[in-house]
């Protein structure tokens, strides 16, 4: 069964609004979670590393004020796309892993900004 | 920086074996992974191999690693229609809690 749950799987929002995506590790504690973005027919691009109890580490070129990441507990990280625009439409995927185990991925969130 | 390359497309007849190849440049890559992505879904971990191994077999899947050439392959025996997906190889310097560097992905198409 799924070990990483991502919600929602699909969301449509109006331009200018904010959208929150949740990523949960189901039966393990994840001190680190990762947020990826995937463009159509492309590979995954790492956006940021979410660290429990501290600030996220963003990759170069990713706007931290636009993509807010909160890792409030050992089983939950959230990504909030603020003031969304059509160019933010994409497939967002989170992953989580425990020490000495491979990373598992959520099922992704398809965001469409109209 | 790290670079992981794959061919973009592969077509295989149902029942034949599929071989998906991957090359990487980072000599510190310690763990190498294969993930499967079906349309509209997340990534499913298929298998992984540690860099001190040459081969790993798991049912229909066989992973071969040539560390000298930095070449990784995934062989799927008796390919079925359900194997149609995009396959990503990935590498990381350690196990767990480490970001992965992904290849470009190979779209596997099964010909009936």
Image (tube, coloured by chain):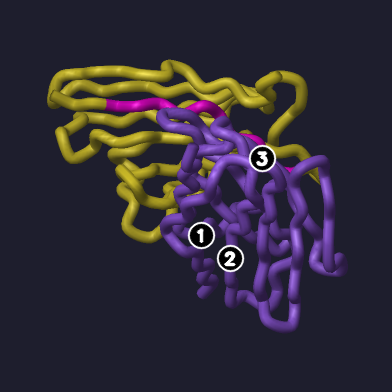
Q: Position of residue A41 (x, y in %)?
A: 34, 47
Q: Chain of mark 2?
A: B
Q: How many numbered tags mark residues here?
A: 3
For the residues labelled 3 and 1, say whether their Cβ atoms are less than 8 Å apart: no
Percent across and percent down for residue B40 are 41, 29
Q: CA distance from mark 2 to mark 1?
A: 7 Å
Helix, strand or loop at mark 1: loop
Chain coloured purple: which letter? B
In the rendered view, does B32 fall on the left or right side of A106?
right
Residue in front for this viewpoint, B46 or B51: B46
Disc 2 or 1, which lies upstream in sequence?
2
Residue at image position (62%, 75%) is: B26
The reply to whether the C-beta atoms of the residues labelled 2 and 1 are less than 8 Å apart is yes
**Drawn colour of chain A?**
yellow
User: How busy is the neighbourhood of tag 2: few (under 14 within 10 Å), some, or many (20 plus)?
Assistant: many
Q: In the structure shown, which secondary structural element does the residue marked by tag 3 occupy?
A: strand
- The residue tagged 3 is B45
Does residue B4 appear to the left or right of A103 in the view shown?
left
- Residue pictured at 70% horizontal, 59% vertical: B32
Gap in angstroms between the C-alphas marked 2 and 3: 16 Å
The image quadrant of residue B8 is bottom left
On screen, residue B94 versus residue B1, left or right, reads right
Residue at which label 2 appears:
B22
Task: Measuring from the top left, give residue A21's x and y in whole percent.
Answer: 42, 23
Q: Which residues are magenta?
A: A102-111
Classify mark 2: helix, strand or loop: strand
Residue B103 bears which disc, if any?
1
On screen, residue A70 above or below B73? above
Q: Which chain is home to disc 3?
A: B
- Decide which of tag 3 and tag 1 comes sooner along the chain: 3
Q: Distance of mark 3 from mark 1, alpha carbons?
A: 14 Å
């Amino acid at each position: 069964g799924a070990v990483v749950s991502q919600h929602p799987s699909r969301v449509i929002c109006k331009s200018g609004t904010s959208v929150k995506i949740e990523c949960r590790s189901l039966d393990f504690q994840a001190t680190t979670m990762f947020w990826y973005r995937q463009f159509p027919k492309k590979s995954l691009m790492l956006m940021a590393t979410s660290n429990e109890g501290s600030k996220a580490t963003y990759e170069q070129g990713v706007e931290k004020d636009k993509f807010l990441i909160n890792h409030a507990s050992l089983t939950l990280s959230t990504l909030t796309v603020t003031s969304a625009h059509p160019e933010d439409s994409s497939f967002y995927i989170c992953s989580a892993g425990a020490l000495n185990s491979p990373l598992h991925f959520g099922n992704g969130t398809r965001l469409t900004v109209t | 920086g790290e670079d992981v390359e794959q061919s973009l497309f592969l077509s295989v007849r149902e029942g034949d074996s599929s071989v998906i190849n991957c090359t990487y440049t980072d000599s510190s890559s310690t763990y190498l992974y294969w993930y499967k992505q079906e349309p509209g879904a997340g990534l499913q971990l298929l298998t992984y191999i540690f860099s001190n191994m040459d081969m790993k077999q798991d049912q229909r899947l066989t992973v071969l690693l040539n560390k000298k050439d930095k070449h990784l392959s995934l062989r799927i025996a008796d390919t079925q229609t359900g194997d149609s997906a995009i396959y990503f190889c990935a590498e990381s310097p350690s196990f767990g809690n480490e970001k992965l560097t992904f290849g470009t992905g190979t779209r596997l198409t099964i010909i009936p």
